[in-house]
Image: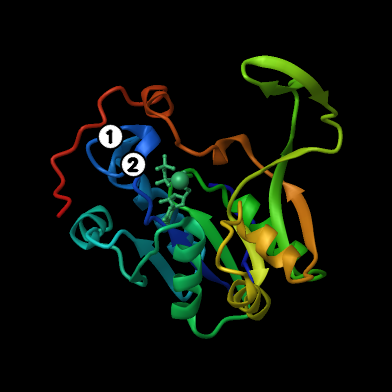
Amino acid sequence: MQDTGPLPQFAAIVVAAGKGLRAGQELPKQFAIWKGKPVLRHSVETLISAGADPLVIAIPPNGERAARHALAGLTGFTLVVGGETRQLSVARALEEVGEADRILIHDAARPHLPVEVIDRLLSALENTEGAIPVLPVVDSLSIDTDGMMAGSAQREQLRRVQTPQAFRYRHILEAHRAWDGETDAGDDAQVLRAAGGDVAHVQGDERLAKLTFAEDFMKVAPAIRTGMGFD
Ligand code: CTP
Ligand code: MG
């Protein structure tokens, strides 16, 4: 891990309340093993050592045993039951945080969290209400209609958006409270923008890639079965 010097005080949320349906594992993917440890444990360890406080983790309604197993031996976090959508999970965790200046919101499904990205995000927050890590699009983009190319999109202005996303806590809390509740936002930056907040781009990192499909696990660890209980 690269040493970037002391980070400013920040809170963090890790959303780990999904079902992981596309990953097709026996357990929700955040509790499966990746590079020798449960997926969730990787980013939680990084956030604890980076000083995240408070640290709130959203888990599935029946996932407390699996979460405690995945995080055995770690301290300094609070578990909260998430919601039906990612956005609801974030909203519940935000209410649980209570008091903070800056906050990072991160997907448990992105286990490798480089501390340099945390540093870039917190620095960018000096001048804006939100900051997100992005990467350029390098492939050509084709618009698909029924399996046929219906057009193309210019990639120059498009960016791939990752987590963690960083926010001024009061602003993202109020933005989530103000969201209509009907539509599911793609991410928290979208929620902040809808409430009028400014979101800066910082350089993302390929290592922040999300584990989404079974193949994503196979690339590093063919055997991901665990005997861990999920009640
Ligand atoms: N997430 C959550 N609460 C939900 C849905 C998702 O906390 N109701 C979290 C997931 O645990 C994951 C992150 O949001 O860490 C990104 O979501 P995604 O990759 O879509 O995970 P899942 O929803 O679990 O997977 P799938 O969509 O394949 O079922
Ligand atoms: Mg999902």
The image quarter in which residue 181 lies: bottom right
Question: Relative to residue 114, is residue 207 depicted above or below?
Answer: above
Give coordinates of residue 195: x percent, y percent.
73, 71
- For the C terminus, the quadrant is bottom left
Closest to the observer: 220 or 85? 85
Residue underneath mark 1: 25
Closest to the observer: 13 or 1? 13
Give the residue type at disc 1: Gln
Give coordinates of residue 150: x percent, y percent.
76, 20
Q: Which mark is residue 191?
A: none
Query: Which residue is pictured at 80% across the width and 65% down the height?
Result: 198
The image quarter in which residue 225 lies: top left
Q: Is mark 2 within 8 Å of ligand 1?
A: yes
Give the residue type at disc 2: Lys
Query: Which residue is pictured at 58% across the width and 64% down the height?
Result: 104
Could you tell me if the residues under marks 2 and 1 are in contact, i.e. CB atoms within 8 Å? yes
